[in-house]
Amino acid sequence: AAGVIQSPRHLIKEKRETATLKCYPIPRHDTVYWYQQGPGQDPQFLISFYEKMQSDKGSIPDRFSAQQFSDYHSELNMSSLELGDSALYFCASSLRREYDTQYFGPGTRLTVL
Amino acid sequence: AQSVAQPEDQVNVAEGNPLTVKCTYSVSGNPYLFWYVQYPNRGLQFLLKYITGDNLVKGSYGFEAEFNKSQTSFHLKKPSALVSDSALYFCAVRDSGPGAGSYQLTFGKGTKLSVIP
């Protein structure tokens, strides 16, 4: 079965640089979620999109922005990167039904030097 | 607000023995509860969920979980542990109902399961 695809899998950036993470949801899933998992931490919700509109917003810094495109893929844009942004970034997708399961991608490991 | 507690950072169990990974939750409405497993440098894999109905939920790889509303718990269990079950396990919750609003999951801190041969 098709899974959530994330690219790149690994990314190394310098402080104050920008980064773009991409997420391709499971076919026919209409909702995309972004989570951040710091070293040894639990995943923290950042933001989600339903039918290309922002639906929920969590602890996403103002330096970050995201959008969902017409083909339902999503991009997380991160600017003015800080050392503390080093983390594993997960994308998940689901159908927008209340009880539906979020399926997670393999994650993008971002390292900020 | 919704929250999850996993009281054990680590659980060690001998191969072949039953295992339990504990989870308690707090929500204002009715909970949707999930268990995910994470292997090193990998994504989160869905194991099982409780939405409504039977309190005992069966999932992937022989895992099951028991929902207990009075104790606000959703413990993960397996009758016979395998070495390959060694991983990090996350419990997650989402509040249900029209007033809950967000579909975001709130995760516990995770429990590292080590199955000893």
Image (cartoon, rainbow, N blue to C red):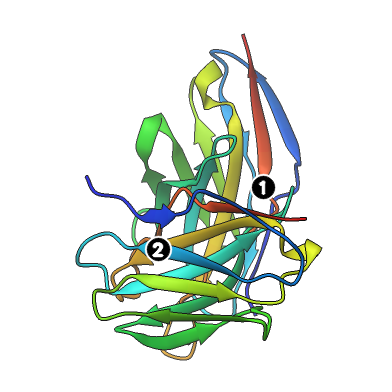
- Residue B47 appears in view: yes
In the image, what residue occupies the spot 72% across and 70% down? A81
In the image, what residue occupies the spot 48% across and 91% down? B99
Give amino acid for label 2.
Answer: Cys
The image quarter in which residue B54 lies: bottom left
> For this view, does A74 lie left or right of residue A63?
left
Q: Is residue B22 above or below residue B14?
A: below
The residue that label 2 is drawn on is A23
Q: In this view, does B84 lie above or below A12?
A: above
The image quarter in which residue B26 lies: bottom right
Q: Residue B74 carries which label?
A: none
Mark 2, Cα crowd under 10 Å, few <14 / some 14-19 / many 20+, is many
- Alpha carbon distance from label 1 to label 2: 24 Å
* Residue A96 at x, y percent in the picture: 31, 76
Name the chain under label 2. Answer: A
Foreground of the two, B54 or A96: A96
* Residue B14 at x, y percent in the picture: 64, 14
> For this view, does B78 lie left or right of residue B56?
right
Q: What element carries label 1?
A: loop
The residue that label 1 is drawn on is B110
Label 1 vs label 2, nearer the camera:
2
* Residue A4 at x, y percent in the picture: 35, 55
**Quadrant of image for the N terminus of chain B:** bottom right
Q: In this view, does A9 lie above or below A18?
A: above
Q: What element carries label 2?
A: strand
Give amino acid for label 1.
Answer: Gly
